[in-house]
Image (spheres, rainbow, N blue to C red):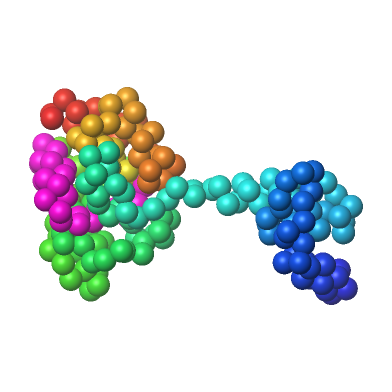
Amino acid sequence: MLVTSTVWLRLHDIEERRSETACGRHLGATELAAEMIAQFFRLPSSSFQSHSRRGARRHKNATMLVTLPDNTAVLAQGRLGLVPHERIRLPDYAVYLDERWADDPNVTWPYRVIDWPDYGLPNDEEEMFGVIVDIHVRAKKGELVEIACFGGLGRTGTVLSCLAVRAGVELREAVDWVRVHYDQRAVETDQQREFIERFAIFM
């Protein structure tokens, strides 16, 4: 308790020290906290700062609204809370890639459920290609379409990669584009990458 209280009292001075500089640069609240904790325990402040930055950097690009290169936008998420799921507004239409969405009482908008096993491929690939084209057409008309599977990463990431290709991203860059603009864990299997390649041919 003594250690905790002492650290708390020293952290209480952060706001007063925010205008100070160290090594010729301004310190933010996070860096000041790291420095003060390090000084108290006589440890290098860099160890606390790097740990803090790693935590803040992890999945920082996860977002529910994905704006494609052609300025169309879709909502993307899952049911596990792995990506943010606060909608900017209710979708006009949705494509759900997991049957567990079908019984959700909160889904009050028009939707379609696709038979697509987790970590697998849709049972009717050509049908899914058509669905992806339809999502893009709807988005270009101004509809807000939601795409979601269970985790929000593999199947959802695959569809987003296909949409990125349709919106003008080079095939070889599609997955990386989604990982930067949606979530760095998107697209989980080689099969899903091959699906994206076949969609590009289908187009």
Q: How many marks?
A: 0
Q: Is residue 155 at least partly visible in the picture? A: no
Please report the residue visible at 16 percent of the width from the left and 50 percent of the height from the top.
Answer: 139
Left or right for 53, reference 21: left
Please report the residue visible at 11 percent of the width from the left and 50 percent of the height from the top.
Answer: 141
Quadrant for the N terminus in the image? bottom right
Q: Which percent across, then down, holds residue 30?
A: 68, 57
Q: Is residue 109 at least partly visible in the picture? A: yes
Q: Is residue 132 magenta?
A: yes
Q: Quadrant of residue 192?
A: top left
Q: Which percent across, then down, holds residue 39?
A: 86, 55
Please report the residue visible at 20 percent of the width from the left and 57 percent of the height from the top.
Answer: 144
Left or right for 194, reference 14: left
Q: Which percent across, then down, holds residue 105?
A: 23, 73
Q: Quadrant of residue 32?
A: bottom right
Left or right for 77, reference 140: right
Q: Which percent across, then down, holds residue 14?
A: 75, 65
* Residue stretch in magenta: 126-153
Q: In front here: 168 or 20?
A: 20
Q: Is residue 169 magenta?
A: no
Q: In front here: 163 or 31?
A: 31
Left or right for 115, reference 61: left
Q: Is residue 146 above or below residue 118?
A: below
Q: Is residue 145 above or below residue 175?
A: below
Quadrant for the C terminus in the image? top left
Please report the residue visible at 35 percent of the width from the left and 51 percent of the height from the top.
Answer: 152
